[in-house]
Amino acid sequence: MINAILVFNNHGKPRLVRFYQRLAEEVQQQIIRETFHLVLRRDDHICNFLECGRLSPRTQALPLSSCLHSLFGGSDYKLIYRHYATLYFVFCVDSSESELGILDLIQVGV
């Protein structure tokens, strides 16, 4: 299930934000900031999947914050993203979604 769709530019300014859960504006802004910083730190040649709470030197994944944990109900979700030119497309999904299916969805949407 898709929990959120975030599109932001290289400077972290949101261009499209859609949460599929009711959240306060402050929580949404914090999630956007933290997600942007997680995605921005990763190199372009690294995998486009971030699993919740994983810390791996090989993939340079970072543990996701408690705000993101509470939003999506623990460790059963992933951030799947793609960087095109000046925009980042990020989908927050649970573990039942296919990573390649979401990447294909992003490609079709672009």
Image: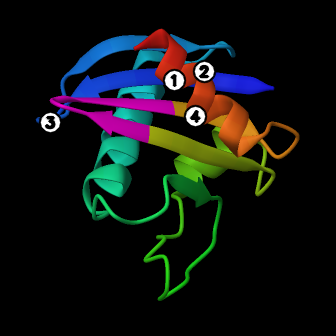
Q: Which is more foreground, mark 3 or mark 1?
A: 1
Q: Which callout, 3 or 2, points at the residue further toward the start of the chain?
A: 3
Amino acid type at mark 3 = Asn
Helix, strand or loop at disc 2?
A: helix
Q: Which residue is mark 2?
A: 105
Residue 4: x %, y % from top left: 59, 23
Q: Nearer the viewer, residue 13 or 104?
A: 104
Mark 4: secondary structure? helix
What is the CA distance from the residue labelled 1 to the residue labelled 4?
Answer: 5 Å
Image quarter in which the C terminus is found? top left
Most extreme residue toward the left, as rendered? 11
Cβ atoms under marks 1 and 4 closer than 8 Å = yes
Q: Is residue 48 above or below residue 103?
A: below
> From where the camera sits, is residue 72 visible?
no
Mark 3 surroundings within 10 Å by alpha-carbon count, few (fewer than 14), some (14 through 19), many (20 or more): some
Q: Position of residue 25 (x, y in %)?
A: 42, 16
Mark 2 surroundings within 10 Å by alpha-carbon count, few (fewer than 14), some (14 through 19), many (20 or more): few
Q: Secondary structure at mark 3?
A: loop
Q: Quadrant of the N terminus?
A: top right
Residue at the spot of label 1: 106
Amino acid under disc 1: Ile
Marks 4 and 2 in Cβ contact (< 8 Å): yes
